[in-house]
Amino acid sequence: MTAPPENLFERVEKRILAQNHDLIDFRRYLHAHPELSQREFQTTQTIRERLEGLGLSVHARAEGTGLYADLVPPDFDPELHPTIAIRSDIDALPILELNEVPYASRHKGVMHACGHDVHMATVFGTGMGLAAVRESLPGRIRLIYQHAEESIPGGAMDMVAFGAVDGADAVLALHCDPELPVGQIGVKPGAFTAAFDLFEFKIIGKGGHGARPHQCIDPIFVATQLATALYQAFGRNFDSRIPMVLTIGTIQGGTVSNVIPEEVHMSGSIRTISAEGRDGVEPLLRRIAGGVCMTHGASYELRLERGAPGIVNDPAITTIYAEVGAAMLGDENVFRIPLPSMGGEDFSYYLERTPGAMFRLGTADGGPRHPLHSPHFDIDERAITIGARILARSAIRLLFEHAIRMKTDRLVETV
């Protein structure tokens, strides 16, 4: 077993580039037919039919959302040959699309505003290219199409339980980045995204007439004090050199302007990079809420919901992305991301089971740049074949590296 022959890359890329228009059409179909988390039934079925058309062995969840599919070369033996997994997410967001394009969402109030349609088409393009050289692959390729990435705790946990990374030696992924122009990628070893958790407080006071606040315990006033204390707390209780972000997204209470309500609900999110910081959040929230409420005679209830941990990219796999990107696009078009994103991504659950890494795929064209989750989000579709080729080249390199390592380990064992 040696390094992959150069013509193997050429054959894969030729196949991907030849199907450029089909991949764009596939992306546009997916964009026009988005489905929310845990409801991706038609999306899953569409992907299944496409993958079966490539000759892949498809394993779909009984729930009807999410699947993985194996591209198996001749004489494959899981004890002797490696497996490289490539993951895409498939769900959309509850956002009303404002783009005036022929492929705009046909499901009102639902939109692929995070680029999962792009991820699906790109990973399919990767599978299409690799299927053309199946006989030359020294191991198995597994494509994971995961449901419910946009929900908590995230569909990745279901896919791990379903066996999507069982036997995998590495797992790859990408994410659209509308801040990078098409033709560029972003890479970063180590901490790549933040852990994401949700909190909800119920502040319980004593309602009454707005003209007699001295007879009441005003939970709206208490909530404002608590909000201020929370925003101030992180910089004085955690290492300020390690990013942490608390955002209060809702404060709800009261029904009319001259009545002090009985209770107020306040919710938000917390994003952390370090495990120590994440573990320290709940005790701090309770200490602050207890102190504020005691001061004003109120009480509170706290619900904390843990989301996905942060992505920690494998340095060796990240290096492969960078080298592949430099060879394809030029080193000047491989952006070394200096700081982790404070966004959350449940790809991290796969990384608890096997090494892996995610890179960012530049999708911006020359026009206005709209961020992820914007009702105006769209992409330069030239990014699809770029992403597919980078994933394919990276997967081939990893297959050959692991195949060489496994062969060497077997030889050592027999000596």
Image: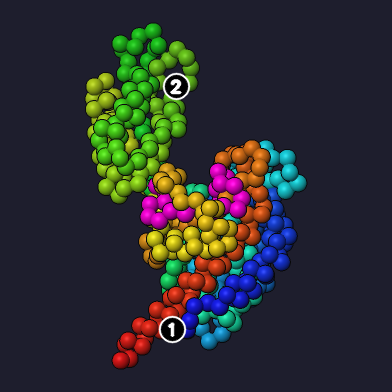
Point out the stretch of residues depicted in magenta: 175-194
Label 2 sits on a secondary structure element that is loop
Give the overall secondary structure of the magenta segment.
Answer: strand
**Residue 4 position in % (x across, y down):** 53, 77
Circle 1 residues within 10 Å: few <14, some 14–19, many ≥20: few
**Residue 267 position in % (x across, y down):** 41, 34
- State yes or no: discs 2 and 1 in contact (Cβ < 8 Å): no
Q: What residue did someone put label 1 on? A: 80
Name the residue located 38 percent from the left edge and 83 percent from the top edge: 408
188 within the magenta span: yes
In the displayed structure, would residue 354 be above or below residue 399? above
> 122 and 36: which one is in front?
122
Name the residue located 66 percent from the left edge and 42 percent from the top edge: 366
- First in residue order: circle 2 vs circle 1: 1
Q: What residue did someone put label 2 on? A: 254
Name the residue located 36 percent from the left edge and 31 percent from the top edge: 202
In the displayed structure, would residue 238 be above or below residue 220? below
Kind of residue indicated by mark 2: Gly
